[in-house]
Image (cartoon, rainbow, N blue to C red):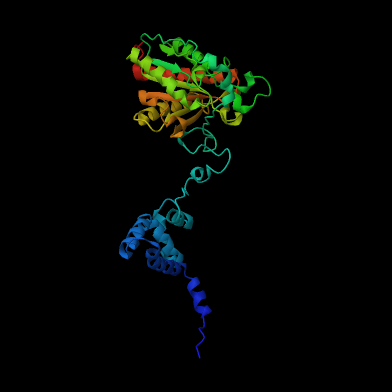
Amino acid sequence: MKKKIQINWSQIKRVKQHPFLLFQIFFICLILFVPIFSIKPFSEASTNILEEWLNQIDGASYSFFMTIDQPILDGLNEQHDEQITVASFALPIFTNLPYQDTRLLFGHELPRFPNTNSTIAVAGEGTNMFSTVIETEPPDYLFENQEDDQQSEQPQPTVTDENILVYTTHNRESFLPHLPDGTPANVVYHETENVMKLSERFGEKLKNYGLNPYVDRTDYWRQLPPGGYSQSYDFSRKVVQEVMGSNDQMKYLIDIHRDAMPRSKTTASINGKSVARLAFVVGGENEHYEQNLQFASELHDLLEEKYPGLSRGVIINEGAGTNGIYNQDLSNESIVVEVGGIENDFEELNFAIDAFAEVFSEFYFEKEGATSQ
């Protein structure tokens, strides 16, 4: 007669009270079972997989598991600035999930979740991953009635000795207060009521301060085919290169845009006055990345000194439709400036552009000298 196997549940319960022991048992089982599911030889399969796993376990994580079983060792973690959690240890081992960055973890699943390609280099007041800049594309039907217009004559750059280029890659980005009532938020574009007014005002203000800018007035919108909005930087790049090729003094490249964020994120109150805020965008995938980041950061700091709260900070974008470049590989002093958002009006926007012109002129004369023009 066969002897009935009896399970000693009391011993199992005692083992369950020691999670570190359970972890060790699990680890041993893993060593034994991994080769079964591998097409490689036993020694090679187990060694390679375990080596990859162990490379991901740092001393702090191992110390944490030690303290679960032996609380007296809790002091091992005091030297670490960040509290180690089970999730921070287990998730990297069993998955490829970016557990430390919720934008990357949920960004592709949640509607309207923040741009996963953005990093906040310098945070302005209230700026976080939910309030970084948003770059939207207009619907294709807006381009359908302009096929005959695409080959229309464009103004040719006539550059002499200017060394500041002001241009607008997305030149028809507009603002709801200046469009018909009921205009949807995804079609805030206009032939005349757009960011080109801001670039022209910025150029005029710089001239008043004694600088010598060239303001590009190319209507890039008319050159784009339906569905080709992502090609905008390809078209503006040609003009930028032409301008720089005809004038070797051209140094500062400033691309004026407007953000698609709501009013609550793009508006501030300064001295009791409602004003549009500015955000500086730097492409993180070009050879001048660090120089451009320094350029943007210095302008942000100057704005904070004179107009606290006006700057939303400096955002680094990588990938997306621009490949993280924004034409900024053409100069060490090249930036995108987001002025206000879709719900700001020109009174608020003009304050921001005037303040930026003031600060930029101070920056310029400090760097180039008052007699450089």
Camera-side residue of 366 and 99: 99
Residue 317 percent coordinates (x, y):
45, 33
Residue shown at 54% from the left, 14% from the top: 148
Q: Is residue 330 above or below residue 60?
A: above
User: Between 294 and 42, which is closer to the camera in this rendering?
Assistant: 42
| Residue 238 locus on image (x, y percent) | 40, 19
Q: Dividing the picture into quarters, in which one does residue 322 lie?
A: top left
Residue 140 in picture, x, y percent from top left? 56, 26
Taking depth in this image into account, of 44 and 325 the one nearest to the observer is: 44
- Position of 298 compared to 185: left or right? left
In the image, residue 259 above or below residue 19: above
Residue 182 falls in image quadrant: top right
Q: Quadrant of the C terminus?
A: top left
Q: Nearer the viewer, residue 289 or 363?
A: 289
> In this view, which residue lies farthest toward the right?
181
Q: Please report the residue visible at 64 percent of the width from the left and 19 percent of the height from the top.
A: 179
Say if residue 302 shows up in the picture. no
